[in-house]
Image: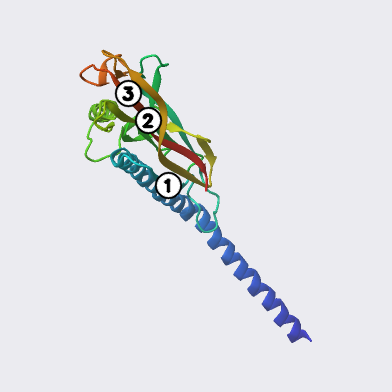
Amino acid sequence: MKKTQEEAVSTVIAMMLILAILSTCIAVYTTTYVPGLKQQSEIIHSEDVKLVFDRFASDVDNMYSLGKPAQFTETFALGGGNILLSPVKSSGTVEAENYVIGTLIIPGKPDYTITQVNLTYAPSFTSWEKQGYAYENGVVWITKDTKRTPASQTILTIEEGISREESIIGDRISGKYITIATDGNNNATVTIPKMSITEKNSMTGSGNANILMNASITPIADIQLAAGECIEIFDTNSTSVFRYPEVPSSSNMNLSVRWLNITVSAE
């Protein structure tokens, strides 16, 4: 009987020692390794977001270049940092907003605003630096609070980034991506590209977000130009950057917009 009791006590002591060792290991892992592992996980997540913004910029460029209906989708996690024994993820906010880059003047019609979409991502409740990203006027930026720097290794300074933005905006409203199709009978179809937001334009949390890009061609006006009239695009400084016809004449015109719609939604 005494021997049985001693064996039982030994078993309990052994279990207590095992639990004590296990608790110590978990405590050491939690206090020593978890912070570093969570930071590493968030650094990887930040790099993933950068790649998404780089691909988004490339997708937009492709849509402008294609000049026809197309669709692209980018999906990414708003938060990161979930690791073993610490599954809590950080969170973030992705937001899209329209940005006016020019105005289309149509004789006898209301002025038509030409926009593009700027996209931003800002992290919150993170174990790492609150480093975000922004797609502004065709250029991807790394952001932190009010500071920003170009994300591309080919753009070395903020001044170069701003200059690149101005160049991209100029290309998008001065005729590089505007298509004109004539039938030889004084009729023309002019298609002007425009980016804008549709449906939801922001999302906050730690789940996955979808950025849907859908390019379609939508007629906006059938107009008849009298001799001396033309359609004209002005930039935000009221400088004329595009006009058609270049030689004023009487003509019939179907005016369309190659519309690049941007939607931000949950996966």
Q: Quarter of the image for the N terminus: give it.
A: bottom right
User: Percent position (x, y) of residue 43?
Assistant: 39, 47
Instruction: Tell which residue pokes out farthest to the front in this image.
Output: 185
Proximity of marks 3 and 1: CB atoms separated by less than 8 Å: no
Q: Which mark is residue 256?
A: 2
Residue at (63%, 74%) from the top-left corner? Answer: 14
Residue at (45%, 48%) from the top-left corner? Answer: 75
What amino acid does circle 2 point to?
A: Ser
User: Percent position (x, y) of residue 133?
Assistant: 38, 37
| Label 2: element kind | strand
Neighbour class for label 2 at 10 Å: few (<14), some, many (≥20)? some
Q: Which mark is residue 252?
A: 3
> How far, Cα to Cα, is label 2 from label 1?
24 Å
Q: Which mark is residue 73?
A: 1
Q: Mark 3 or 1, which is nearer the eye? A: 3
Neighbour class for label 3 at 10 Å: few (<14), some, many (≥20)? some
